[in-house]
Amino acid sequence: MKPLAWMAWTWQTATFFCFIAACLITMLLWEMLKPGGSPKHGVLGLNTTRGDRLFISLLGSAYIHVAWLGLTEQPLWWGSVISVFFALTVFKWV
């Protein structure tokens, strides 16, 4: 019996968790190379650090994907493309 068989893992699920792990490792390495990450005052009127912007990007992307699944019949890849642009926007201006 496979130890994780009860979780019904698919390659998409594994890719998602690998992406989250890669984001966290990248942020760790970025922080080690350039500590502090000096907070930016963005268009939302908040002072945000790199970690804050990553969190906002991931949370917003989750909402985009859920809305995409609930409101359209189009392939989810389009929601992923929108999420990438959302994340780039967050890191640039938020």
Image: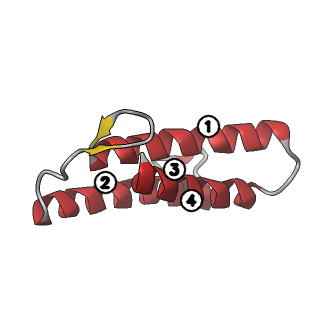
Please, what is the three-letter code of the amino acid marked with disc 1? Tyr
Q: Circle 4 sits on which residue?
A: 84
Left of 20 or right of it: where is 81?
right
Crowdedness near tag 2: few (<14), some (14–19) or many (≥20) residues, C-alpha within 10 Å: some
Q: Circle 2 sits on which residue?
A: 24
The residue nearer to you, when weighing 2 against 93, is: 93
Q: Please give the label number shown on residue 8.
A: none
The residue nearer to you, when weighing 63 against 14, is: 63
> What is the spatial separation of the Cα atoms under label 2 and label 3, in whole angstroms?
31 Å
> What is the spatial separation of the Cα atoms under label 3 and label 4, in whole angstroms?
38 Å
Q: Are marks 3 and 4 in contact (CB under 8 Å)?
A: no
Q: Please give the label number shown on residue 1.
A: 3
Q: Are marks 1 and 3 in contact (CB under 8 Å)?
A: no
Left of 70 or right of it: where is 84?
left
The percent position of residue 44, horizontal first and vertical second, equals: 44, 35
Could one spot residue 7 in this view of the protein? Answer: no
> What is the spatial separation of the Cα atoms under label 4 and label 1, in whole angstroms?
13 Å
Q: Earlier in the sequence, mark 1 or mark 2?
A: 2
The percent position of residue 87, horizontal first and vertical second, equals: 50, 54
Crowdedness near tag 4: few (<14), some (14–19) or many (≥20) residues, C-alpha within 10 Å: some
Please, what is the three-letter code of the amino acid marked with disc 2? Leu
Q: Do the residues labelled 4 and 1 touch (CB within 8 Å)?
A: no
Q: Circle 1 sits on which residue?
A: 63
Task: Name the residue: 57% across, 45% down.
Answer: 61
* Quarter of the figure that contains the C terminus: top left
Q: Earlier in the sequence, mark 2 or mark 3?
A: 3
Give the SS element for disc 4.
helix
